[in-house]
Image: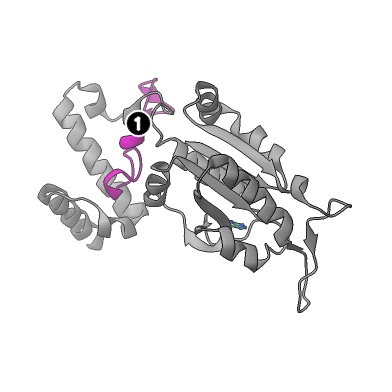
């Protein structure tokens, strides 16, 4: 997977993503990352990249020329038109399903806006996907781009050490993950659930499944609608519902 980020703050992207698991993946070349400074492409002699909006109003708008030229140079280098993701609160809300879809691509371009946004005409010309990371407004698209890159990268083969851990975490089967415990066996009077110390694998599996179901029911009941449930799961949930209603 090759990521390209068109931004006015390339160092913000490179600094943050060179650490931890994504940093290790970059070193191992499971993924690559290039942050391209849009300002380097401006033809304005003062290196300006923005101007006031037509029709008036607050703030500044990023102009078409530097954004388009930065994009075109990249497209020529890549050799085809890859998906271009524009980060905006007006986009579709990012999800694990979208992460899976993007992870199948070979190249992805992220376009980060600032100020009051980017001139609509260049967006129409180059953007394929409008993506939001949630219903709140940030100062720019860099943090959202990093969130999306992180979520996609852990699905790219070779990025996580244990391939399984990507499969069995929260949102597998649309259920939340069961609680985890490690040493010590007792802390501040709180004991690790005894079934986890039993060594009985079938019982542990069953307990974990029930914890996932309970957790999802209590914290994110909306997810249950699209969860992959067995008859046994349904019975367990019916029981939970009956007991909480009493
Ligand atoms: N830019 C500003 N706020 C954003 C958000 N919530 N999601 C994606 N891009 C943004």
Image quarter of the C terminus: bottom left
Residue 25: percent from the left, percent from the top? 50, 27
Up-down: is 99 above or below 197? below
Q: Which residue is at the front of the view, 61 or 71?
A: 71
CB at disc 1 and ligand 1 closer than 8 Å: no
Rendered image coloring scheme: one colour
Residue at (84% x, 51% y) in the render: 47
Q: Which residue is at the front of the view, 229 or 87?
A: 87
Q: Which residues are magenta?
A: 166-190
Q: Residue furthest right?
A: 46
User: Magenta segment, principal secondary structure?
Assistant: loop
Instruction: For mark 1, give the secondary structure.
Output: helix
Please name the residue that numbered disc 1 is placed on.
165
Residue 207 relative to residue 26: left or right: left
Q: Quadrant of ligand 1?
A: bottom right
Residue 28: percent from the left, percent from the top? 50, 21
Residue at (26% x, 57% y) in the render: 226
Residue 243: percent from the left, percent from the top? 21, 56
Residue 64 relative to residue 125: left or right: right
182 is within the stretch colored magenta: yes
Residue 8 relative to residue 191: left or right: right
Q: Quadrant of residue 223?
A: bottom left
Q: Residue furthest bottom?
A: 55
Residue 202: percent from the left, percent from the top? 14, 29
Q: Quadrant of residue 10?
A: top right
| Any part of residue 231 in sight | yes
Residue at (70% x, 61% y) in the render: 64
Q: Residue furthest left?
A: 231
């Amino acid at each position: 997977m090759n990521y390209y980020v068109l931004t006015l703050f390339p160092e913000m992207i490179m600094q943050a993503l060179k650490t931890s698991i994504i940093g290790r993946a970059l070193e191992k070349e499971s993924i690559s990352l290039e942050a391209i400074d849009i300002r380097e492409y401006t033809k304005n002699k003062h290196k300006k990249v923005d101007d006031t909006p037509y029709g008036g109003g607050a703030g500044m708008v990023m102009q078409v020329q530097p954004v388009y030229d930065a994009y075109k140079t990249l497209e020529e280098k890549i050799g085809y038109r890859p998906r271009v993701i524009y980060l905006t609160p007006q986009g579709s809300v990012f999800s694990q399903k979208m992460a899976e879809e993007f992870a199948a691509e070979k190249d992805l371009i992220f376009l980060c806006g600032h100020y009051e946004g980017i001139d609509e005409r260049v967006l129409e010309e180059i953007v394929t996907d409008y993506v939001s990371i949630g219903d709140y407004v940030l100062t720019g698209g860099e943090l959202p781009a990093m969130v999306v890159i992180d979520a996609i990268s852990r699905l790219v083969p070779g990025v996580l050490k244990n391939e399984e851990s990507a499969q069995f975490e929260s949102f597998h089967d649309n259920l939340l993950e069961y609680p985890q415990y490690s040493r010590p066996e007792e802390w501040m009077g709180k004991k690790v659930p005894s079934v986890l110390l039993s060594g009985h694998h079938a019982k542990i599996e069953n307990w974990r499944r029930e914890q996932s179901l309970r957790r999802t029911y209590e914290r994110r009941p909306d997810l249950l609608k699209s969860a992959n449930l067995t008859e046994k799961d349904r019975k367990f949930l019916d029981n939970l519902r009956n007991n909480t209603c009493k």
